[in-house]
């Protein structure tokens, strides 16, 4: 009897059984600096939605890049945008839908001013792709805290506290939500929004420097593990809260300090695929 139930259960895909899609989060890069074995910040949800682009094209085949529908960019710093110009150029030569670049409006201004300015890189919105007959990109600047739905995925840009214009993302697919702060020092609005959101399955924030680099962390708009713990206290959601964006060569120290936090939600984000 037990066997037959097991057989029936195995035949039902998880998504039908739970009546919920399972969001897959592939962490291509979980660091704020990089070397041969640690990668810059870049996350991919369900193989089609990217959050930040420090590592993206450098770890994906052309076919995988063609499946990316949208990239939400938290801010213009190079460790979050390094692969973006290359992803755009690869898409220009592929028969794929335009890549939607999404960012808080002040961040989008910086991307246009400093990257897609015709000098550092072309503005591919102004160029027709020979593969498709239309531009390879589309830009979607978002107002703060206003939910926008594109192809069944909802995005809310929520400004955070960094040294330049920066906004985290609340991304909802089906009934599930993942919250990404991007780089931030102590902040509050994004946690208030997360505490009220439905179906939050994970929150991804940062711990860039170890505790004894508190001054540098504060001046550069980042968190230490102690500051991460203080942020945890603002979060009422019962979901894992991941520390990403560790700076080399401090990653081991930061990881050990995160492990010492007495809150079972505190986790270290590693470069692998998570399913929620
Ligand atoms: Zn960064
Ligand atoms: Zn930054």
Image: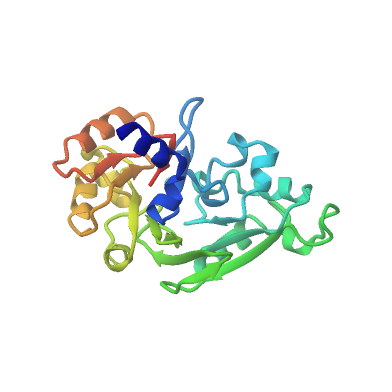
**How far across and down, in percent of the image, does residue 208 sit?**
33, 42
Residue at image position (41%, 43%) is: 275
Residue 218 horizontal side relative to residue 121, left or right: left
- Give the vertical position of 240 relative to 72 (above or below): above
Residue 54 in the image: state x and y as whole percent.
Answer: 53, 43
Closer-to-camera residue (247/12): 12
Q: Residue sitting at 48 percent across and 41 percent down?
A: 26
Residue drawn at x 21%, y 35% as measured from the top left: 259
Residue 19: image location, x then y, percent = 41, 56
How many numbered discs sit on the rendered protein? 0
Instruction: Quarter of the image for the N terminus: give it.
Output: top left
Residue found at the very far top of the displayed protein: 36
Is residue 51 in view?
yes
Any part of residue 31 in sight: no
Query: What x and y, as percent, mark residue 60?
Result: 61, 37
For this orientation, the residue located farthest to the left is 262
Of 211 and 169, nearer the camera is 169
139 to the left or right of 239: right
Is 126 in front, or is 22?
Answer: 22
Coloring scheme used: rainbow
Apparent side of residue 259 relative to residue 100 in the rendered image (left or right): left
Nearer the observer, 218 or 155 = 155
Would you identify the image quadrant in which residue 7 lies?
Answer: top left
Q: Is residue 143 above or below residue 63?
A: below
């Amino acid at each position: 009897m037990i066997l037959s139930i097991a057989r029936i259960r195995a035949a039902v895909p998880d998504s039908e059984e739970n009546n919920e899609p399972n969001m897959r989060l592939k962490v291509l890069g979980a660091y704020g600096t990089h070397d041969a074995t640690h990668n810059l910040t870049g996350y991919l949800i369900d193989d089609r939605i990217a959050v930040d682009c420090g590592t993206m094209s450098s770890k994906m085949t052309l076919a995988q890049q063609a499946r990316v529908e949208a990239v939400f960019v938290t801010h213009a710093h190079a460790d979050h945008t390094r692969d973006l110009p290359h992803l755009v150029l690869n898409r220009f030569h592929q028969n794929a839908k335009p890549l939607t670049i999404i960012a808080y409006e002040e961040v989008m201004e910086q991307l246009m001013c400093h990257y897609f300015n015709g000098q550092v890189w072309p503005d591919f919105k102004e160029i027709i792709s020979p593969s498709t007959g239309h531009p390879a990109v589309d830009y979607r600047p978002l107002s703060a805290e206003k939910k926008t739905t594109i192809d069944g995925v909802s995005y809310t840009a929520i400004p955070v506290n960094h040294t330049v214009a920066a906004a985290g993302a609340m991304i909802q697919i089906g009934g599930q939500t993942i919250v990404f702060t991007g780089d931030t020092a102590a902040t509050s609005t994004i946690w208030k929004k997360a505490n009220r959101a439905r179906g939050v399955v994970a929150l991804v924030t940062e711990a860039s420097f170890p505790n004894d680099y508190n001054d540098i962390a504060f001046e550069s708009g980042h968190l230490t593990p102690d500051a991460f713990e203080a942020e945890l206290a603002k979060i009422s959601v019962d979901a894992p809260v991941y520390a990403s964006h560790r700076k080399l060569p401090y990653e081991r120290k930061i990881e050990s300090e995160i492990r010492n936090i007495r809150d079972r939600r505190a986790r270290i984000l590693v470069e692998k695929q998570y399913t929620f």
